[in-house]
Amino acid sequence: MTSFISLLLPLADALIVAPPPPGRVVALGDLHGDFQATTRVLRTAQLIDEEHSWIGGDATLVQLGDILDRGTEERMLWDFFVRLREEAPLAGGKIVTLLGNHEVLNALGQAGNFVHPAGREQFGEDRCAAFMPGSEYATLLADCPVVAIVGSSVFSHASLPATATRESLAELNAETRKWLLGERPDAPYDLCHMGRDSPVWDRTFSNPHDRSVGYAHCMALKKALGRLGVSRLVVGHTPQDAINCACDGAVWRVDTGASRWVMSGACQALEIAPGGKARVLCESQQQLELARAQEEEEEADDLVPLEGAPLLTGGDALDSPVCDPDA
């Protein structure tokens, strides 16, 4: 099976560092099983046409993780990115997809009630087995970096450790890959806690949403960016009312909760021009009206919990696995 991840350098270079891309870089936030919202954003960014084919030329698309869970169209999104991954390089473009906390939860066997009933068998009869380290789909996820540097930006699903260096991030990517391939027994610690330095869980730079970040955190971030030789951090993970920045532009928050199984938020993307200037790409009024008309014709399914079990929070999921990878 083809991986939907397009790496920019050989896997030996565990920190995915791309040379300055020839074209623009477009950052796409959490998708959570919503194909319609995904294609709306990509059309707004002029990366795909009405037939959902790549028209982005030499653009680099960075998707910040959380393709999985919550929605009904996870497999459709997976296959869609498989195809884009094959199409984009033919036009000089690139696709980079990061690991989000929900990809991690699936590999841990702890996604539990985050999986929509319609998605339980989209990857086979036993979803836990499908994503267990060493399995077919976990092997494909092993191609996803936790952190990637593309041009003048560093991309991470949720956050950046205060002490981050290129060496420490490369080690995290390499150890995460080993875990997903079944070559080490446990996931790296930074994927399994919700503290300050977890790149897939920490909300220091995004919560409360649409608000400023404390001075000390901003200063620590700017020092880390300096060590990495980049200008900004781009994260998803925490839905915002609209894409926005904090810390004088040192961090951009691009998760708008666009999936209709999250909050049907704004379908937006962040564009970073070759010169480094960032701007938010928004739907036109005509696009919004067409999308709303289509949504009125479709009745979205609610997220239904598994029988006899309450919905889990992220912390609950980490503490109470649904299946035992060692069983």
Image: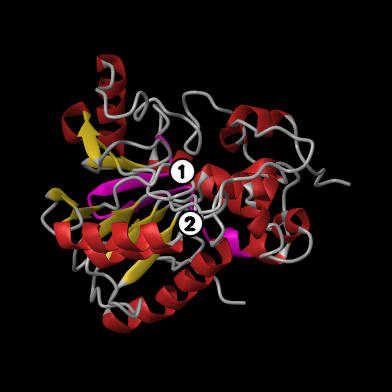
Along the viewing direction, whichever of 271 and 90 lies nearer the viewer: 271
Q: Residue furthest right?
A: 327
Q: Residue furthest bottom?
A: 90
The residue under label 2 is 299
Quarter of the image where one finds residue 314: top right
Q: What residue lies at 22% left-to-right and 35% top-to-bottom?
A: 245
Along the viewing direction, whichever of 254 and 202 lies nearer the viewer: 254
Q: Nearer the viewer, mark 1 or mark 2?
A: 2
Along the viewing direction, whichever of 181 and 292 lies nearer the viewer: 292
Identity of the amino acid at label 1?
Answer: Val
Q: Is residue 195 left or right of residue 182?
A: left
Q: Could you tell me residue 16's position as x and y percent?
A: 41, 56
Q: Is residue 160 left or right of residue 211?
A: right
Q: Could you tell me residue 253's position as x and y percent?
A: 30, 39
Distance between mark 1 and mark 2 Cα atoms: 15 Å
Q: Could you tell me residue 295's position as x and y percent?
A: 38, 58
The residue under label 1 is 262
Marks 1 and 2: CB-CB under 8 Å?
no
Identity of the amino acid at label 2?
Answer: Glu
Quarter of the image where one finds residue 2: bottom right
